[in-house]
Image (cartoon, grey):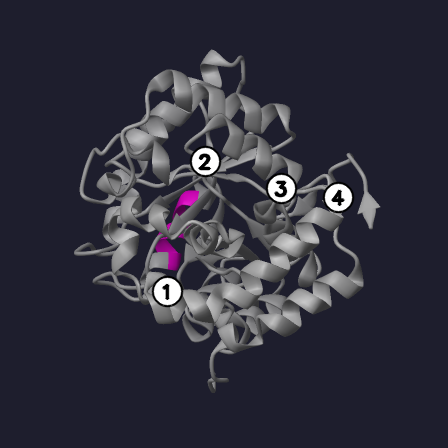
Amino acid sequence: MTTDNRIILRNLGKSEIKITPIGLGCWQFSKQGNLAGKFWPSLGDELIRDVVRISLEGGINWFDTAEIYGQGASEKILAKSLVALGQKPGDVLVATKWWPIFRTASNIKKTIDDRLAALSPFPIDLYQVHQPWGFSSEIAEMKAMAELVKTNKIRHVGVSNFSAKKMRSAWETLQKSGINLVSNQVQYSLLNRKIESNGVMETAKELGISIIAYSPLAQGLVTGKFHDKPELLKNIGFRKYSSQFKPVGMEKSRPVAELVKKIAVKYNATPSQVALNWLIHFNGNTVVAIPGATRATHAAENTGAMKFRLSKEDLYLLDEISQEFKGPVQKT
């Protein structure tokens, strides 16, 4: 077991940006501003500020938000909270995302000033295409992103939910402008390891692209709290319709959750910290994670996951017990 309170920063892809292995995901700051925002309760400004404060105090130096999170509500309250806490441009790193659904690539340049206004005074260090399902190709979208880099509207370009094939295409397009694709934000956890079998992880490592893992705790399932207290399932909102929260899905994930809890005792850590620690170390420096937090205690737990390191033995024990969550190997 290795305990070390020093947080070693990592490069975001092939960029000069140095980030902590864990950032704060800010979807829950949506204020129920639109349909996407209604996934979460409306958090008060003071609570949001506390979550951001504790994240900063714990060493986190970057925050991930998006246009679609409350139609700018998350971006605005994040910026407001950072300012209230004395943060200035350059003190922290901010990532946000452009929503492509029912839009073409031309909208990227048309709406960038709205994104900058929402995040003011903070610049956009990483701008990501949120989904691969726009009305334009990833090639057209990357050309528009390259223009934003050249005009200093954004610093770096990323994508989200892109397949290995689309990720490579985006990378190749940006390379023609001398720009690196630095990240692909995808769902990844001990209970969802599909990117290891569909080529995304392999391609990311080959091209030097960081994987930003969202839903790194499988919406809380990996911690075992729902296995231990099934009554909690009554109050999980839309999640209750997911197959993983049905009886068969719960039994499938139980062995992983039990091992996570067992290892947590060994490290005097919480189950969520063990699950996050596995994510940020098992694949070297390739994977960083963005857990959310709706309570100050959640934020403290997130930062604590960076203060120790699982042994190689424990990393591989968790790897072995979660093999079935990789899914079948797919050709890329």
Of residues 66 and 304, the one drawn nearer to the viewer in this rendering: 304
CA distance separating discs 1 and 4 = 29 Å
Q: Earlier in the sequence, mark 3 or mark 4?
A: 3
Q: Give the range drawn in magenta.
A: 142-148
Dot 3 amino acid type: Ile
CA distance separating discs 3 and 1 = 36 Å
Q: Dot 2: what SS?
A: loop
Q: Earlier in the sequence, mark 3 or mark 1?
A: 3
Q: Mark 4 points at which residue?
A: 308
Dot 1 amino acid type: Gln
Dot 4 amino acid type: Phe
CA distance separating discs 4 and 2 = 20 Å
Q: Name the residue under label 3.
A: 17
Can you give x and y, in whole percent of width and height, for residue 330 in the image?
46, 84
CA distance separating discs 2 and 1 = 21 Å
Q: Does the magenta stretch include residue 72?
A: no
Q: Mark 2 points at which residue?
A: 293
Question: What is the crowding at mark 2: few (fewer than 14 residues within 10 Å), some, or many (at least 20)?
Answer: many
Q: Is residue 206 above or below residue 3?
A: below
Instruction: Say which residue appears at 25% left-offset and 39% top-offset.
Output: 37
Can you give x and y, in whole percent of width and height, for residue 56 in the image?
58, 26
